[in-house]
């Protein structure tokens, strides 16, 4: 969500003529994140978010926009893509695929307590239930195949100890993905990036989930592990807060039939940590130039992975 492609107020106003959203009032670049170009877009009729897609192809985008539209229609608190005057939610702006979605109230809560985690657990369960009836499929673009592709690219930047950790964990995940237990896990469209900065709270009340552009078709248990690894981390060591973890899982399980398996759950927590260690290594060591970029520390998820491997 950095600004890679600049959009002027004049260009935004011209693009808005294709919508029934009123006149431009304010255009403000969003600095957080590293994938797409995002702007807050305020008009005389409301507050929206304008996204220009930097990496995702136009043929992939209907999956993401359709998923948000489906979830919103099912009552899940998330942005809803808006159609232009021609009835389509995807257009092109400054040479990039672009869309406008509704803007949710609230802001991220970066120091959550058990109650915040319980609300997130409930939200994730609602998303997973609604996603079961979403028929389009798109392989998780940051799944196992991507880990295998990226690992050799980041390996030269790692110490001998880090290289051994990466090779051993990747081998364990490849082996796990070939088991009957893995194959039996529930599959649907999943958010796959439900971190603290992708959930909004209006005070202490949940506002909704945002940034679905890492979503894909994957195991719901992986999505739960991704969420748990961020919301329930206790400190810099990567260890989990038992209170927050229990609150999140209890709220999730109260609305879902999915109960973490004693074998699959620890490996999914490790898989979720590996995925973000690799992506942060890749973005840190092989960055793209951008006008506004917020780099994230790869070391955090290395510590989370080591903690999960130790059973913490």
Image: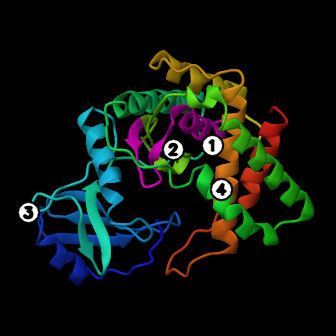
Residue 173 lies, with reference to residue 96, above or below; the image says above
Residue 235 lies, with reference to residue 158, above or below; the image says above
Q: Nearer the viewer, mark 4 or mark 1?
A: 4
**Residue 47 is at least partly visible in this image:** yes
Is residue 208 rendered magenta in the image?
yes
Q: Do callouts 2 and 1 mark residues in contact (Cβ within 8 Å)?
A: yes
Q: Which residues are magenta?
A: 206-235
For disc 3, the marked residue is 85
Numbered badge on residue 122:
none
Left or right side of 32 for 272: right
Q: Nearer the viewer, mark 3 or mark 4?
A: 4
Numbered badge on residue 147:
4
For disc 1, the marked residue is 230
C-alpha gap between disc 3 and disc 2? 32 Å
Is residue 113 rendered magenta in the image?
no
C-alpha gap between disc 2 and disc 4? 19 Å
Left or right side of 218 for 165: right
Q: Do callouts 1 and 3 mark residues in contact (Cβ within 8 Å)?
A: no
């Amino acid at each position: 969500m950095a600004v890679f492609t600049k959009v002027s107020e004049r260009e935004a106003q011209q693009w808005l003529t294709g919508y029934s959203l009123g006149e431009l009032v304010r255009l403000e670049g969003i600095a957080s994140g590293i994938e797409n170009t995002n702007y807050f877009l305020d008009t005389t009729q409301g507050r929206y978010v304008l996204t220009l897609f930097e990496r995702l192809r136009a043929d992939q985008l209907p999956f993401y926009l359709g998923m948000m539209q489906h979830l919103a229609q099912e009552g899940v608190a998330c942005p809803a893509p808006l159609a232009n005057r021609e009835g389509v939610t995807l257009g092109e702006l400054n040479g990039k695929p672009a869309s406008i979605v509704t803007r949710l109230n609230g802001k991220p809560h970066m120091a959550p307590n058990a109650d915040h985690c319980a609300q997130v657990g409930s939200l994730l369960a609602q998303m997973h239930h609604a996603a079961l009836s979403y028929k389009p499929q798109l392989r998780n673009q940051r799944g196992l195949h991507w880990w295998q592709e990226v690992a050799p690219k980041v390996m030269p930047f790692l110490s001998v100890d880090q290289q051994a950790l990466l090779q051993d964990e990747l081998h364990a995940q490849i082996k796990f993905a070939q088991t009957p237990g893995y194959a039996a896990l529930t599959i649907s469209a999943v958010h796959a990036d439900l971190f603290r900065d992708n959930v909004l709270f209006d005070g202490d009340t949940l506002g909704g989930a945002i940034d679905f552009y890492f979503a894909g078709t994957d195991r719901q248990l992986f999505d739960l592990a991704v969420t748990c690894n961020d919301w329930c981390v206790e400190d810099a060591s990567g260890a989990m807060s038992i209170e927050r973890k229990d609150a999140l899982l209890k709220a999730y399980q109260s609305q879902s039939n999915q109960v973490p398996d004693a074998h699959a759950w620890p490996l999914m927590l490790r898989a979720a940590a590996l995925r973000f260690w690799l992506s942060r290594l890749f973005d840190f060591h092989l960055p793209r130039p951008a006008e506004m970029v917020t780099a994230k520390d790869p070391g955090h998820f290395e510590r989370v992975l080591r903690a999960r491997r130790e059973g913490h």
